[in-house]
Image (cartoon, grey):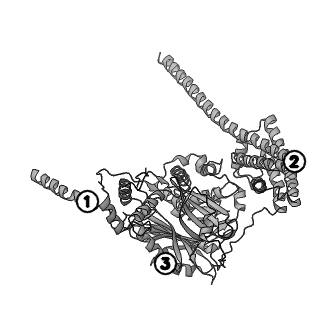
Amino acid sequence: MRKFILLIGLIMLVFMPIKDTAAFSDQVIQQGAVGDDVIELQTRLKDIGFYQGKVDGVFGWSTYWSVRNFQYEFGMKVDGLVGADMKEKLRATTTYKQTNQQEETAVNVPSGFSQNDIKLMANAVHGEARGEPYEGQVAVAAVILNRIKDNHFPDSISGVIFEPRAFTAVADGQIWLEPNDTATRAVLDAINGWDPTGNATYYFNPDTATSPWIWTRPQIKRIGKHIFCK
Amino acid sequence: MIRTISIIVLSILLMTSIVIGYNFYEKKNNVQLQVENNYQRAFHNLVYHIDDLHDQIGTAIVMNSDQGLSPQFVDIWRTSARAQEEISHLPLHLLPVQHTATFLNDIQDFTYATTIRNLDDDPLSEDELDKLEVYFKQLDEIKSDLQEAQATTLNKGLTWEEVEIALLDGKDNSENQILDSFRRSEEVMEDFSETNQLTEEDEKDIATFVNGQTFTEDKVIDKTLDMFYITDEAAIEVEESLEGASLNHYNVTYDFEDGDLFMDVTEKGGLPITFIVNRELADQTISLNDGVDIAQAYLSFIGYDNMTLFESKQFGNEGVFTFVYEEEDIKILPDAISVKVALDNGEVIGLNAREFLLNHKKRQLNRDLLSEKEAREYVNDDVTIEEAQLVLTRKDDDEVLSYLFLARYKDDTYEIYIDAQNGEELRVKRNVDLAMSPN
């Protein structure tokens, strides 16, 4: 048994350094990407002084400009894409030690929105439409965004969501339930431009709607239990 | 003996429950009072702002000097924005206050436009003065209606809680004096909206690109089977859009083992407007960069050529790519299509062609333009320009050719749009590297 453990130890010793030097995967890294490759890229660029930002694993603008600078200084094609050539150059000029601890990678956020905005919207979507099909959840998120654009409504996410009596989930406290992953994905899809409602600013459940006025709005379509209207 | 003890125990229990009950009652009362006070504050503020607005517009009408008018318009702009803000704090959601909101909005647009204009060179026209008179008259009526409601709340102790109950009751004609006054001012506004063409018409979108034969439900089903390699025809559901849709379309839904998909298809020509395939994503095996090629190939496969990548971003294990139409080396920004690619197996799981379908048309591009070098002169000297390209972008309702400069200032990257005809700075946008920590 002891021999066996020793053997494993030996195997690990043999393989670890290999893993270190060949950490970059084969993929071409480009702006917008996230993950371990981006962490390595940022660390290496920082090591050689081309990158001053945070090593967060998100290929944003500051990483983009450092890559281009690097390419320019080393006489490569300046395109902001990190391919085999550039990785080779990076390996030759910088050192990188992959830490055993899993580094926390950050994730992308659509421009113009904060993490908290997305959380708040996910809460509202979950509270309002968690029993609905995925389309219905994207639709509710889209209605919130359409209201922000509409002059008749407040122009912030919190303003729209907390408008008195605007959403039943807010009135009865269901908005404070912990949203699931589906609600968050639905919000991201809506923010990225998907709008299954076709610019709706209202929706209601025809079985429980109390206001006769809501029936006078021009209806666009029905998704799940909700009718979406202008 | 037992009897006495049980009498004592029972009376102690009774006393405690009375005390606990009263405590609860008091707490609940307190909370309700807080809510009521918030509503009252919003309501009284609203009446105050409307009163203020009335005065300010009256003053603007008799003002003669342009030096005085501009600051006056700034005040009016701010007061009307505040009034609108207070409306959004009242539980009026189910009561149509649309017209009043439109009215306040119209005042804001008008005063904003006149404030940023140089009134010395371009004084108020007769029409604009007439408009101020109309605002003044309308505000007079709203003001008296609201002040009447204000008097009722103060004198008779009418509460907003009652308004809320009346609204939730669902009877639109329920008797409530506060509601009545809002309804009256709404009627006043309706007349105003009609005479000033402020009512939003249920316009249909003009989409010249969307043409061809009208698709039947059967044809839509066939198309869906083709697009997603589905064999189970019975599981596809198709529903027609309703009257209010600005672009007539079919809504297709399909449930499969690991998820579901939904798609909107135009009635004319059967073009996909949007679709999303919703399923769990496995681990990433495909890079974002390969995703670009997949998305591009997919677009030409479904008939969109000359599309060039404008933005790419990875969210979890999916890549979201925005392409724009390219014509004569000019990026046509309004003609945008987004494609979502699953980075686990490279499947296309989302399409959003709405912008493209609504905006794409044959364009006459005027090439009589400033050179890039000339356009650079119009950019702030303190920024470093890194990239430049010619794009077609929107300015209000028009489309203009402009140079899009990607520029750096300190740690930030900015998009700067310079009108390619006259060098006007159309728009400056700060691009922030937004990243959030996973939770």
| Subunit bearing disc 3 | B
- Place of residue B31 in the rendered image (x, y in percent of width and height, measured from the top left): 63, 35
Q: In this view, does A115 lie to the left or right of B333?
A: left
Under circle 2, the secondary element is: helix
Under circle 3, the secondary element is: helix
Q: Mark 3–mark 1 contact, CB under 8 Å?
A: no
Does label 2 or label 3 sit earlier along the sequence? 2
Which amino acid type is shown beneath numbered disc 2? Answer: Gly
Residue highlighted by disc 1: A19
Which amino acid type is shown beneath numbered disc 3? Answer: Met
Residue highlighted by disc 3: B227
> Badge 1, how many Cα within 10 Å: few under 14, some, many 20+?
few
- Place of residue A18 in the rendered image (x, y in percent of width and height, measured from the top left): 23, 60
Q: Give me the residue at 32% from left, 65% from top.
A: A88
Q: Residue B58 carries which label?
A: 2
Quarter-wise, where is residue B243 in the image?
Answer: bottom right
| Subunit bearing disc 1 | A
Mark 2 vs mark 1, CA separation in Å? 77 Å
